């Protein structure tokens, strides 16, 4: 009994939600709603947010409570009691009337670093305290609910589809179902996407500038998070040079992991993308200083 009492006390104050209630019910604005007390007791008393005197628009009939014309003041935590013993609690909220995905200007953005079936999503919803999200996997099964707490209206969560096969063609999009809850309202909508459309690789790694003879060469390796084999998961590379006068010049390569560097440049950095999917470039690597490499002697062969 104690864990439920603690939950009720947590939910009675406005804006105190830190997780989805154990039991909640969603109704439409200005429509009647029936709340039932899950108990074998025939006679119970009701409280709303800890207040023992229900308002006039609440009609109690034993284990059943009818809310006449649900409005925002009638939302909150409904508890049924047998004397001083808590029997059940239901958190009541109003369904959001905003178009799906447009509540508070919400815009869900998802990103995967590779084809391993893992990705992360973020969105903004200033008026909602908590969210939960569930993934419909590529094989049609449902994932577990992931509970998401926000910070200053910003929400972030990570997901994994263990049934995802990086070598198979994506025939059906993934579905991410989101539910948001504030102290008096509820939002629910679904976003659809393919992994191939949200992939953004990490930057290339192990960048090295070496001098061989009179030329400088840059070598690198694919991101550690990028899947293998390289022959199947090719990458398209973008080198950006900064010349001595500050001008930046780009050069593009596919499949290579070494190239001779342009003469007269001061430094260079590199990015990559999947040439066969969404043309989203990785973040840039750190700048590599070419002047220091020029001053070093030729590398040993």
Image: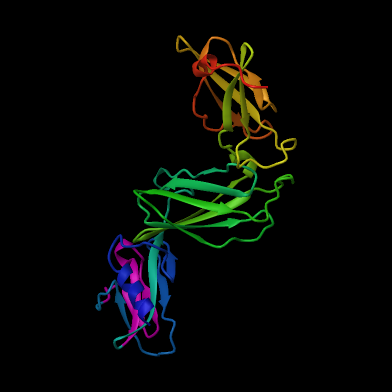
**Camera-nearest residue between 99 and 23:** 23
Please identify the quarter of the rendering in which residue 207 is found: top right
Residue 219 rendering spot, x and y as whole percentages: 62, 26
The magenta segment: 54-82
Residue 1 rendering spot, x and y as whole percentages: 38, 82
Please identify the quarter of the rendering in which residue 3 is found: bottom left
- 70 to the left or right of 99: left
Residue 248 rendering spot, x and y as whole percentages: 50, 15
Applied colour scheme: rainbow
Please identify the quarter of the rendering in which residue 19 is found: bottom left
Quadrant containing the C terminus in the rendered view: top right
Taking 168 as reference, is 139 above or below it?
A: below
The total of numbered circles placed on residues is 0
Residue at 65%, 28% in the rendered image: 236
Taking 28 as reference, is 271 above or below it?
A: above
**Camera-nearest residue between 65 and 163:** 163
Taking 251 as reference, is 204 above or below it?
A: below
Q: Is residue 61 magenta?
A: yes
Q: Is residue 69 magenta?
A: yes
Residue 237 rendering spot, x and y as whole percentages: 62, 26
């Amino acid at each position: 009994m104690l864990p439920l009492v603690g939950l009720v006390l947590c939910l009675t104050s406005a804006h105190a939600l830190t997780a989805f209630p154990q039991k909640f019910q969603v109704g439409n604005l200005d429509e009647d709603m029936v709340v039932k007390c899950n108990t074998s007791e025939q006679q119970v008393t009701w409280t709303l947010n800890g207040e023992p005197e229900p308002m006039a628009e609440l009609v109690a009939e034993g284990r059943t409570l009818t809310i006449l014309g649900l409005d925002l003041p009638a939302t909150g935590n409904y508890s049924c009691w047998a004397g001083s013993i808590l029997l059940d609690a239901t958190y009541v909220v109003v369904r959001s009337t905003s178009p799906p995905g447009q509540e508070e200007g919400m815009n869900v953005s998802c990103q995967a670093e590779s084809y391993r079936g893992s990705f992360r999503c973020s969105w903004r919803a200033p008026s909602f305290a908590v969210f939960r999200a569930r993934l419909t996997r590529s094989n049609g099964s449902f994932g577990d609910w992931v509970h998401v707490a926000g910070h200053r209206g910003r929400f972030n969560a990570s997901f994994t589809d263990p049934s995802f096969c990086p070598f198979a063609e994506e025939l059906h999009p993934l579905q991410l179902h989101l539910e948001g809850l504030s102290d008096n309202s509820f939002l629910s909508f679904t976003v659809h996407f393919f992994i191939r459309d949200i992939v953004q690789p990490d930057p290339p790694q192990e960048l090295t500038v070496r001098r061989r003879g009179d030329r400088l060469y840059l070598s690198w390796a694919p991101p550690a998070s990028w899947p293998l084999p390289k022959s199947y998961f090719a990458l398209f590379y973008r080198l950006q040079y900064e010349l001595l006068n500050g001008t930046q010049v780009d050069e593009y390569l596919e499949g290579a992991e070494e190239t001779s560097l342009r003469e007269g440049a001061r430094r260079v950095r590199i990015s990559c993308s999947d040439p066969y999917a969404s043309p989203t470039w990785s973040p840039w690597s750190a700048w590599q200083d070419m002047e220091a490499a020029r001053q070093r002697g030729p590398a040993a062969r």
